[in-house]
Structures are given as structure tokens and as C-alpha cells.
Amino acid sequence: MKVAGGFVALLACCSATHAAYFSEGWKPGQPVTKATQLAATATTTNAPAATLQNSFQQPLQQPEEKQSGEGGFIKGILTSGPLATALSKAGIDMARVETILNTPEAEKRGWDPRVQMITDENYEDVIVNEVFESAAEEKERVWFLDITIGSEHSLSAYVDSQYDEAYNMTQIAQDLPHVRWGRIDYLAVTAITTQWLVWHAPTLVVLHERGKVLRFYRPRNIRMEAEVLREFLKEEGWRETEPWASVWSPQGSRAEIMRQFSIYFAKFYYYLSRAPRWLILVISGSIASTVLQYMHGNGGNQEPARPKPRRVLRPPPAGSAVTRAANADTEGTPVSEGDASQKATENAISSPSKVKKRKGGKKA
């Protein structure tokens, strides 16, 4: 009986515990009891503090976008993994290479990065279609451009240094607000230099009226010193030089032809510069060989046969054996045995006087 009573008490405890898990809970409209608050408190206290803070006090963090594309793939291979280890052992610092690749072109070439780079792509937007606040500002606008090769050429590198120094002095003094400074990379820009017929660098250009008025200055035309360049712009010494005026100039009658030609030539140079150098050498050599063969040939006609030189027979001198044989034949005198061997020569080679005598005898 004691065992049965203990078993019944154990079943009663288990049923009470099981009923607690299947409680209906709080319903809308039902007053909040102390037990409900205790249950909610117990539930919240079981959650980690960091999770609650991230859920209520901090915004949701967006997942980082993985770097994709060909550049990111190649960069990942070169900067991590066994290839990066092998390159580092070979003495190649890929971090340094990446820094150089991400450096702006102006800094790579040693130019002042504050100077506006003028290219075929941004020339129309930056200069031709520049937005002004007033007509007076548009009239006063002057662009001072430096067409350069860079440090590859000693004279061009010197002009670049003086140009950048003049620009820096102007930025400090702030005395040329109407002048804009720009640089054109001669090796990378094709359409602009072709349209302006600029085939040499370094060259300084004073551009006025949205690119319609151009003045060009070579190192032999102006002293390439920073102070001289600044005074040249401050005193507007460029007005003493006549602007470029020809049929090919921006205001000439053939300006549109030149502009279209520069566009197509830029496209041609774009594809040509991306072709393998060996292929260019093969094609240019084949063309040159064909042209030279055509120029040194006779147009495909066979060379005419040269006439063979005619043999001129001279009459034998007087008193020779042939002459005596001829006289003996005419006069009936006997011919010696030595002269008889030349009988055949007598008929083939006869003196002109003898032929004339024979003709005269027939006429008589």
C-alpha cells in the first residue's frame, strides 16, 4: 500500500509538471499577471546580451560584397595564395605593384595632379561646352595648355617642371582667376593633336573662345621659365601673336573635314596600338616590299629584246692579198697560189670604189 500510495503521488507531480508546458498563455484582452511578467523576464534573460544589443540598438549589417570580375579575380590570385608567395620570394612586392597601378597617371609621370588632364574624351565637355555664369566670364576665359611627352624627353620634362611651377605660383598668388591650366599627353591623345596639326612636343597652346582661337608656342618662341610664363599670361602677351588662321584652323573653310579626319584617325590609332608589334612589322614589311617591287618594275611588261650589234666590215687596205686577187680576176692576170685561198673573201668583201666602178660599167 505504501508503494501504491507513493506511485500515485509521483503520477500527480508528473501531470502537474506536464500541464505547465501546455499552458494556453496570455490572450488579447486578458490582464497581465505577475506570472506572465516573470515568464517574459525569464525568456529575455536567457538570450545573450550581445544579441539583444545588436537587435535593438544597432542597424542590421549588410553582408560585404565580394569582389568580382576579371580584375578582382586576377588581383586575388596575385595578392594571395601560392603565386603571391612565389612572387614575394622572387623579390616582387605585389602590394607595391598594386599601389603603382592605382596611382593616377599624372603622379606616375611626375606631373602636378591639380592640373586638369585634357583627353579626346573630355575635351568637348571641359573646354568647348564649358558652363559660364556670365558672358563676361566666357569672354575672358583663357586656357593655357601644355602638350608634352613627359619625362621620356629631357626638354619636355624641363618644360613640364617650369609649367607646374608657374601654375603653383599662380595658385598661391590667385592673380589669374580667368586662366585655366590643362595638360595634354601627346602619346595618349590623338584626335586633338591631329585636328590642330601638332606633330611636335613640347608645345604650349593659348586657347580662347571655346577652342576657336589657337596660338602655339614652341621652346624657341618663348622662354620656358616659370616667372616668364606667369608674366606672359598676366600681361596677355599672347595677344601680340597672330592666331592660327588657315583653311584647316577651327574657323577655316575645311575645319569640319579636319575634325572628321581626326576622329577616324584616332579610331585607327586605337586599334593599331593594341595590335601585336610583330604583326605590325610583318604587315608593314609586306606592304613596303610590294610597293618597292611595283616602283622598280616595268608595270608587268616583258623587257624588250635588245638588238644584236651589227658587225661593220671595213675594206681591206690597198696592196693586200685580197686587193691583188680582185685585180687579177678583173684584168685576167694569174693569181698566185697563196692568194687563191682568199677567193671567197673577194666576193664578200669588196671595196666601195670597186662596187661603184661595176655599177658604172653596167650603166654604160
Image: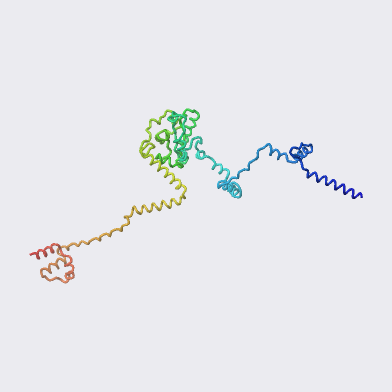
Q: Residue furthest left?
A: 364
Q: Is residue 69 left or right of residue 244?
A: right
283 or 213, which lies in front? 213
Question: Quadrant location of the C terminus?
Answer: bottom left
- Quarter-of-image position of residue 57: top right
Q: Position of residue 1 (x, y in %)?
A: 92, 50
Q: In the image, residue 152 lies at what x, y percent?
A: 47, 41
Q: Quadrant of residue 159?
A: top left
Coloring scheme of the render? Answer: rainbow
Q: Position of residue 286 (x, y in %)?
A: 40, 53
Q: How many marks?
A: 0
Q: Is residue 94 visible?
A: yes
Which of these two is toward me, 219 or 256?
Answer: 256
| Res 187 quadrant in image | top left
Q: From this viewpoint, which residue is outermost toward the right?
A: 1
Residue drawn at point x = 72 percent, y = 39 percent: 49
With 296 as the anchor, is 110 left or right in this view?
Answer: right
Q: Report the side of 255 relative to 82 (left or right).
A: left
Residue 207 or residue 85, whichever sits in front: 207
| Frontmost residue, 311 versus 256 | 256
Vertical comparison of 324 with 126: above or below: below
Residue 210 x, y percent position in the rendering: 43, 34
Kindly tell me whether residue 162 is visible in this rendering: no
Q: Residue at x 43, y 41 (%)?
A: 191
